[in-house]
Each structure stands twice: as structure tokens, then as C-alpha cells.
Image (spheres, rainbow, N blue to C red):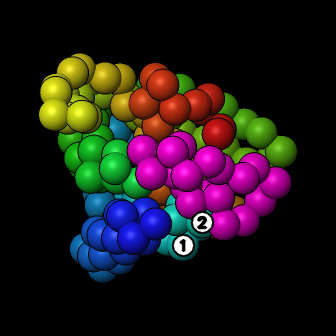
Amino acid sequence: MKTKIKAKQKAWEFYEAWRQVKSNSPALGCEVRVSLLGWRHITGATGAKKRTFKDMYWRLKLLPYAKQIIETSTTVQNISERKGRKYYALEAMIEIEQDNSKSMRKVRVILLEDKQGNKIFYSVMDKKSGSPHA
């Protein structure tokens, strides 16, 4: 149990620091806000979707890659609309370390557009961890 709490605490420290420095997206030509909306979505703290610890843990591990993708990606892979909200997907092939081995994975970052047109970090996943709006 201590490992779970420690992993989430470490991820929160990264996320909180990221919120302070922000990220600029070359693909969208704007700043991307990093807010509690993304944290709550990834951790399953709000909404109808409850996450397993394994899913939440893996998404938390992907947070540094999400920051990297937002700040370096020059292409928006997909734009979709759901329930009147616009979602942007950025993707990259990234070498990820897991269980002491490295492998290339497609990592997808989802950004949400608010009513004022601001782009907000919403979610991160790799091919194994879920659908675009998971």
C-alpha cells in the first residue's frame, strides 16, 4: 500500500510543478493549461469512470511523456467533438521503460478546449491503456 501512495505522491509533485511552468504547444500555437481537471480525470477522482489502480498508476507514469509530447509535437493527430466539447489528440512514438526493459509505444495526449478557446491538458494513455476519451 505504501508504494501506491508514494507513486501517486511523486506523480502529484511532478504535476504540480508542471502546472507552475505550463507548456506551449507548437501543434496548436498556444499555451496549454495544466489544471486539476486533468489530474482528476487521470486519477478517476471525478466523473462516471472509475479507474483501476493499475490504469491510474500507468497514466501517472506517462505524465512526463505527455508534457514532452505537448511541447514538441508539431501535428494534431485528431480533432473530435463530444457533448459540445472539442478534443485534440497529439501522438508520438516514445521509448518507455517498464519492468526494467524499454520499448517503443505510441503515447496519446488528449487536450480539451474550454468555452473561451483555451486548451487544457485532459488525459494521457498509450496503446495499452485506453480509448481517446478514456
Tag 1: amino acid: Leu
Check disc 2 and report its element: helix, strand or loop: helix
Q: Nearer the viewer, residue 7 or 83?
A: 7
Question: In the rendered structure, which segment of residues is drawn in magenta?
Answer: 41-58
Q: Give neighbour class at mark 1: few <14, some 14-19, many 20+ (Cα, 10 Å).
A: some
Residue 115 in the image: x percent, y percent? 69, 62
Say whether residue 27 is magenta: no
Q: Closer to the observer: label 2 or label 1?
A: 2
Q: Which residue is mark 1?
A: 36
Q: Nearer the viewer, residue 75 or 65?
A: 65
Residue at (81%, 54%) from the top-left corner?
48
Q: Which mark is residue 40?
A: 2
Left or right of 36: which side holds 68? left
Left or right of 52: which side holds 30? left
Q: Quadrant of residue 97?
A: top left
Check disc 1 and report its element: helix, strand or loop: helix
Whether residues under marks 2 and 1 lie with C-beta atoms below 8 angstroms apart, the answer is yes
> Up-down: is 117 above or below 61?
below
Say whether residue 55 is magenta: yes
Alpha-carbon span between mark 2 and mark 1: 6 Å
Residue 106 in the image: x percent, y percent? 35, 23
Residue at (31%, 23%) from the top-left corner?
105
Residue 5 in the image: x percent, y percent? 43, 71
Q: Give neighbour class at mark 2: few <14, some 14-19, many 20+ (Cα, 10 Å).
A: some
Tag 2: amino acid: Arg
Q: In this orientation, does residue 21 appear?
A: yes
> Up-down: is 88 above or below 40?
above
